[in-house]
Image (spheres, rainbow, N blue to C red):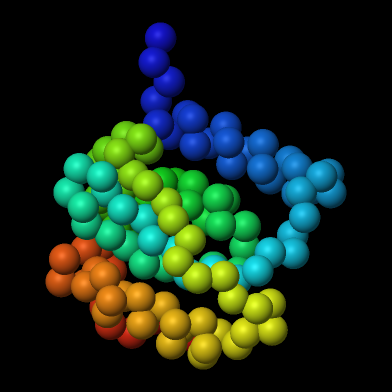
Amino acid sequence: MAVKTEELISGIVSRLEKQLISGKLSTKFSPVIYLIKNTKTNKSYIGRTRQEFFKRWLQHFRDMDEIKFHKEITKDNICDWSFRILCIMDCSVTDKEMSKKEQHYIKKYDSITNGYNDRNETKA
């Protein structure tokens, strides 16, 4: 019997959360700028996070809101998406510096016009 994407993601995130609580998974991660790409359409989403990037990737599949990217990502199977780290930043980087770097990649990959980013400005 095939496992639904939602069940798969829920199980993985649940295990990650249990590892965090038990102290088996470190919470000290370098901030990253990442790209999530739909392998069917070649459209991309650029994001940033200070948390463990794999967990952030899975959270996108669980987010059920009105953001264009979240509407699209929940339509497909998790296997139709790839995740790539574009830039690893120093832990001392400010939110403003992260935002500037994220904007650089949003422009580079044209992920507003030909992707899933909603706007040219990100929250700092």
**Going by the image, does 113 lie left or right of 2?**
left
Q: Residue furthest right?
A: 23
Q: Is residue 32 visible?
A: yes
83 in relation to 109, above or below: above
Q: Residue at x 22, y 57 (%)?
A: 43
Q: Viewer-proximal residue, 2 or 53?
A: 53
Q: Residue at x 48, y 61 (%)?
A: 85
Q: Position of residue 65 (x, y in %)?
A: 34, 57
**Going by the image, does 113 lie left or right of 5?**
left
Q: Residue at x 17, y 49 (%)?
A: 41
Q: Is residue 59 visible?
A: no
Q: Residue furthest top?
A: 1
Q: Residue at x 49, y 37 (%)?
A: 9
Count of numbered circles in the view: 0
93 in relation to 55, above or below: below
Q: Position of residue 20 (x, y in %)?
A: 75, 49
**Going by the image, does 109 lie left or right of 82?**
left
* Quadrant holding the N terminus: top left
Q: Position of residue 60 (x, y in %)?
A: 43, 52
19 in relation to 118, above or below: above
**Going by the image, does 112 lie left or right of 9?**
left
36 in relation to 39, above or below: below
Q: Position of residue 103 (x, y in %)?
A: 36, 82
